[in-house]
Amino acid sequence: MRERPYVLLSCSMSIDGYLDGATDERLLLSNAADFDRVDAVRASCDAILVGARTVRRDNPRLMVRTQSRRDARTARGVPECPIKVTVTEKAKLDPGAAFFTAGDAEKIVYCASPRVEHARAQLGGVATVVDGGMPVDLRQVTEDLYDRGVGRLMVEGGGTIHTQFLTADLADELHLVVAPFFVGDSRASRFVNDGDFPWNPGRRAKLADVRQIGDVVLLRYALSPRFDSADQEER
């Protein structure tokens, strides 16, 4: 089996497990202090991955925001912002989206095999388009990213992507932030969808850290043996 990066999943959700509301208006689940923590985590990673729906719905920039952290990355001899990565089945992505236009970081699109040529025609000028298989195989994606020099991958969602990484047992660490309110609308997207998860009543995930950050709480879970060695390196 080929090597893959250390994979850290990052997610903010409501008390009842939703990633957003049921409308097109963006729901803020975190606070300024936690956004700064996420920025620090981004700065520690080689690449950030989101699903195509997140690119379309949230139009994220996926950049390190703080100049001092960008400068620190440059001093380490790496680009000031991590590589941006997205995964898509249908390649319905706007080349003018902030994912592609914000910043100078490399952009990579992993696309289902039948839509690769279409994706290259639409996005080839703003990103590297890679055949991800049919359907897109996340293990293959992570192995390819490792071959491209990605040692630490941050996955920021959405729910379908989180579900796929978790059910495929490809996650080493989970940062789960819980906001102090309920959404209460089943039309909204949840943190994960139905699936066969490796962590269940017979195999509990290891809770490594709990931290209050203003009015939210961060739950940090160790999901693989690689967590311990990575945690020691951070310390």
Image: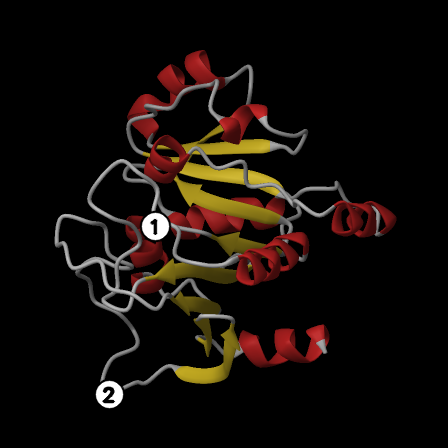
Q: What element carries label 2?
A: loop
Residue in the picture at 79% in, 50% down: 68
Q: Residues within 10 Å of mark 1 (few under 14, many from 20)?
A: many
- What is the x, y in percent for residue 57? 34, 34
Q: Which residue is drawn at 26% across and 59% down?
A: 192
Residue pointed to by mark 1: 161
The amino acid beneath tag 1 is Ile
Whether 219 is drawn above or below 167: the answer is below
When asked about the image quadrant of residue 193, the answer is bottom left
Tag 1 or tag 2, which sits nearer the N-term? 1
Residue 202, which numbered label? 2
Q: In this view, does 75 lie above or below 214?
A: above
Q: How are the colours assigned in the image? A: secondary structure
- Quadrant hosting residue 59: top left
* Position in image of residue 165 (x %, y %): 37, 57
What amino acid does circle 2 point to? Gly
The spot of residue 111 in percent (x, y) is 38, 31
